[in-house]
Image: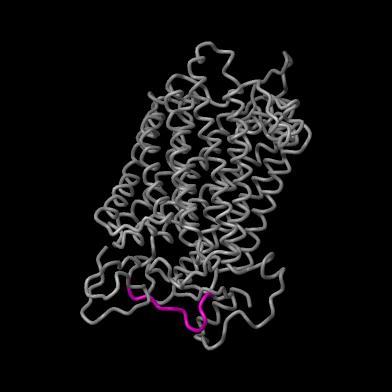
């Protein structure tokens, strides 16, 4: 039965049937072309995980090149083949690795892997809906994501190599097919892949927005929504506003590459020869790219922060501190994130007055971010903390969100930014605040909702090993990068051995690379835990974390429609933990209020 039919049935109050079992599902309709939001969430998660493995391996390879330039590595020959003849990575292929690593991690792992997984899994379950507003569109959005992932990976194998203009693909490297080897077919495939990815993202986002607005169960007012749903809802709105701008940027770039236009190209010489382009501006591309590029940071971060809110409240056994302030800060971050893109362009020749405007809006975003950080800390304060792996990763996120955010104050100031722009300082900043924080949110969500997804528990002790090694290695990689950045070391350089100025920093790069290799290898502990627990983990109880939200009221066995019979109604907000007058330290949302019980004002 389609999702639409299920909803129509619910609104007609026909609750007597076992929903969704009117026809026998085949392997293909259940596991491949599924319209069940829980199965689509698993598809997003496993595809995102595979892309993540590719992205992390690339980062280890190019870190080895930076630490030991011109060395020969057998592992390069095994994995990179003729990209690394005799085990030595070539300079243009190094740039391709950096480009595709950034693209995969930002879009395919942290945008689709994180948002696609948890928005799909949790929105219908936590608002009390049978499924998404449109199961069919949901399925289409996953398959577009899958096709774009395949095209991105295939671009690694074409003649001339993958796109090599950095993940930001600035023209003219991306606009002139003859500019460098990585400007050819690989670049075209990058653009095609991203266009399909954006279509997938828009379909998913529209579905999430409609579902949250229209399909909440009886009693589920907007002020009773868990913070996870607020985060996914607002993230989807940012995506709908900003992703089409990147699509237009990519389409104009395709015109420049293939149809002789010059939106981004002006007077250009190649080997002394004047090209016929005139009138365009590469800075136009920067404006269009970063109009998505900065909200993208929060498209990645907000779902992780929403997941963290839920996990910290559950495992502190306390109501989340300042619920309304948290919702307001999510909305403020969403609005401000769309008017700060110019801080990526302070050295593009921007008018200093405009620079000061972007500095102001950038520093303003620190206020809602600080509200979230302080509210997490206050929720943890004097709580009855359950330090399971999900909770540790959530606390780790608060740590990296603060440390990464502090350096944002330097980079957001137009005068200070000039000194460290395009150095490793920038790499350290955005990896901590966006990459590591969002990954921690993703890991926290997987450990917390794994029982809901697969009906089994993950191994806690392997989770502890995974957290502590990952936490130490993440800071081991990105903390020293601040210092080599302040010393002036530029990013994306194939080797720094040509510059005697940077000889003293070579040992620091070796230390960073050692941490990166150890951290990367220990992700195998997580992968083993994830895939083995799926089949052999301990059977999960109905509500393993004693949580209040509606997803834990649905049966452990998956069924299309989520609840047999009637959908639970909501009588209270999601954070009634340790409430006086109740026997247990948690009161699920579907438990009616007692006589004289006061609903908490949040």
Where residue 91 sits, quadrant-wise, is top right
Q: Position of residue 5 (x, y in %)?
A: 59, 78
Work out which residue is located at the far bottom of the displayed protein and give it. Answer: 16
Q: Position of residue 8 (x, y in %)?
A: 55, 79
Task: Specify the quadrant that holds the C terminus.
Answer: bottom left
Depth check, front residue: 61 or 439: 61
Work out which residue is located at the far right of the displayed protein and give it. Answer: 159
Q: Residue at x 54, y 60 (%)?
A: 206
Depth check, front residue: 400 or 372: 400
Q: Is residue 393 above or below residue 140?
A: above
Q: Position of residue 127 (x, y in %)?
A: 44, 69
Where residue 577 sits, quadrant-wise, is bottom left
Relative to 570, 178 lies left or right: right
Residue range corresponding to the magenta coloring? 562-572
Q: Position of residue 485 (x, y in %)?
A: 45, 24
Examine the residues drawn in magenta and state their main secondary structure.
loop
In magenta stretch: residue 564: yes
Work out which residue is located at the far top of the displayed protein and give it. Answer: 500
| Coloring scheme used | one colour
Relative to 328, 38 lies left or right: right
In magenta stretch: residue 366: no
Q: Is residue 401 above or below residue 124?
A: above
Number of on-image labels: 0
Task: Specify the quadrant that holds the N terminus.
Answer: bottom right
Work out which residue is located at the far front of the displayed protein and give it. Answer: 461
Q: Residue at x 39, y 63 (%)?
A: 226
């Amino acid at each position: 039965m389609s999702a639409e039919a299920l909803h129509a049935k619910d609104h007609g109050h026909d609750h007597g049937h076992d929903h969704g079992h009117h026809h026998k599902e085949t392997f293909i309709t259940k596991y491949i072309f599924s319209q069940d939001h829980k199965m689509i969430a698993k598809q997003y998660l496993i595809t995102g995980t595979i892309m993540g493995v590719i992205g992390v391996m690339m980062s280890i390879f190019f870190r080895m090149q930076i630490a030991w330039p011109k060395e020969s590595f057998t592992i390069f020959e095994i994995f990179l083949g003729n990209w690394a003849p005799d085990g030595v990575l070539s300079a243009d292929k190094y740039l391709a690795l950096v480009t595709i690593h950034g693209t995969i991690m930002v879009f395919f792992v942290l945008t689709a892997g994180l948002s696609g997984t948890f928005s799909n899994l949790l929105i219908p379950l936590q608002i009390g809906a049978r499924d998404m507003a449109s199961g069919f569109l949901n399925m289409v959005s996953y398959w577009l994501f899958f096709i774009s992932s395949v095209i991105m990976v295939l671009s690694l194998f074409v003649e001339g190599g993958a796109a090599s203009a950095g993940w930001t693909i600035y023209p003219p490297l991306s606009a002139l097919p003859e500019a460098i080897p990585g400007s050819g077919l690989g670049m075209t495939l990058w653009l095609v892949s991203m266009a399909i990815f954006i279509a997938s993202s828009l379909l998913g986002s529209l579905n999430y927005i409609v579902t949250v607005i229209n399909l909440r169960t009886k009693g589920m007012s907007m002020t009773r929504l868990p913070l996870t749903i607020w985060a996914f809802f607002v993230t989807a709105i940012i995506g709908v506003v900003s992703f089409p701008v990147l699509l237009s940027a990519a389409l104009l770039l395709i015109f420049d590459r293939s149809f002789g236009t010059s939106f981004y190209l002006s007077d250009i010489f190649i080997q002394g020869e004047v090209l016929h382009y005139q009138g365009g501006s590469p800075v136009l591309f920067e404006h269009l790219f970063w109009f998505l590029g900065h909200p993208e940071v929060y498209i990645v971060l907000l779902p992780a922060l929403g997941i963290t809110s839920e996990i910290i409240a559950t495992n502190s056994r306390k109501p989340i501190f300042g619920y309304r302030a948290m919702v307001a800060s999510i909305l403020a971050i969403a609005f401000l994130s769309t008017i700060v893109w110019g801080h990526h362009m302070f050295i593009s020749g921007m008018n200093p007055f405009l620079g000061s405007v972007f500095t102001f809006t950038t520093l303003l975003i620190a206020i809602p971010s600080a509200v979230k950080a302080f509210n997490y800390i206050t929720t943890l304060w004097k709580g009855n903390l359950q330090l399971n792996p999900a909770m540790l990763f959530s606390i780790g996120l608060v740590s990296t969100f603060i440390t990464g955010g502090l350096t944002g104050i330097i980079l957001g100031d137009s005068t200070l930014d000039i000194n460290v722009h395009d150095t490793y300082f920038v790499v350290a900043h955005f990896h901590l605040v966006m990459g590591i924080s969002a990954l921690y949110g993703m890991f926290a969500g997987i450990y917390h909702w794994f029982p809901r997804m697969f009906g089994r528990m993950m191994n806690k002790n392997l989770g502890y090993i995974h957290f502590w090694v990952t936490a130490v290695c993440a800071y081991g990689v990105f903390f020293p990068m601040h210092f080599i950045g302040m010393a002036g070391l530029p990013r994306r350089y194939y080797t720094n051995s040509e510059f005697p100025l940077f000889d003293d920093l070579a040992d620091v790069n070796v230390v960073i690379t050692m941490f990166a290799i150890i951290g990367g290898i220990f992700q195998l502990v997580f992968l083993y835990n994830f895939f083995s627990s799926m089949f052999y983990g301990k059977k999960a109880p109905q509500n393993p974390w004693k949580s209040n939200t509606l997803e834990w009221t649905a049966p452990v066995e998956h069924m299309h429609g989520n609840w047999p019979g009637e959908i639970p109604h909501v009588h209270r907000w999601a954070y009634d933990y340790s409430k006086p007058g109740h026997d247990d330290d948690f009161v699920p949302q579907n438990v009616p209020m007692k006589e004289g019980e006061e609903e908490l004002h949040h």
